Image (tube, grey):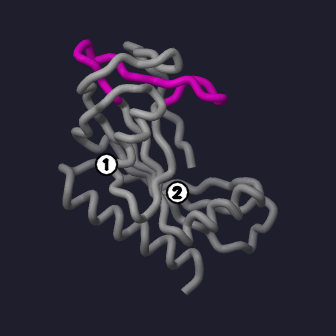
Amino acid sequence: MGVAGRSRDHVEALLGDLESAYESFPVNQTTVSVSGEYYEQVVEQAQQGVARADVHVHNDDGDVLLVETGDGLVAPGEIISAEDSLEQRAKRAVRQAAGVECRIETIEEATIAGVHSKSDPDAEPVYRLVVLLSGRLVSGTPGPEGQWQADPPESELVI
């Protein structure tokens, strides 16, 4: 089985696990074309069975925590390997990015992304699951890179 089949099977298995653990949530599908170099990184990560998780952490006022990265303000999150619990890794990503503890409550949405290479249109697609979780602040105050926003911009899909 090629990388397309293995990555698709991994996404389906992870999605099934999430559907068993959480109430219903929307599942979207999309395709993206990336540079050949980035495509190779995605292929390598797919062979390790990875997904991406981002978290909208809410405070008592309903504001959402965003962190400053080189790409601007975004929800904390990162790539998660197959060995990691998605929820535990997402909480760790929030702690590392913003210095706060959160409790994961729901899944806002999941996206199955078919990743294609711009430089090699004949290359197999690689599938990745990108999950946007919703959490609640448990403790801590965000460091200088974090800030609460009452009306955060819509999250962009990060592959």
**Residue lying at 46% horizontally and 24% vertically, measured from the top left:** 66
| Label 1 element class | helix
Q: Is residue 112 above or below residue 99?
A: below
When asked about the image quadrant of residue 55, the answer is top left
Give the number of the disc on residue 148. Answer: none
* Pointer 1 local density, CA inside 10 Å: few below 14, some 14–19, many at least 20: some
Toward the bottom, the furthest residue is 1
* Residue shown at 52% from the left, 68% from the top: 48
At label 1, the amino acid type is Glu
Q: Which residue is mark 1?
A: 87
Residue that badge 2 annotates: 113
Q: Which residue is nearer to you in this view: 142 or 7? A: 142
Magenta stretch, residue numbers: 57-74
Q: Is residue 67 above or below residue 33?
A: above
Left/right placement of residue 147 relative to residue 125 reads: left
Residue that appears at 27% across and 25% down: 137
Q: Is residue 70 magenta?
A: yes
**Which secondary structure is most common in the magenta stretch?**
strand
State the SS at label 2.
strand
* Structural distance between the alpha carbons of marks 1 and 2: 20 Å
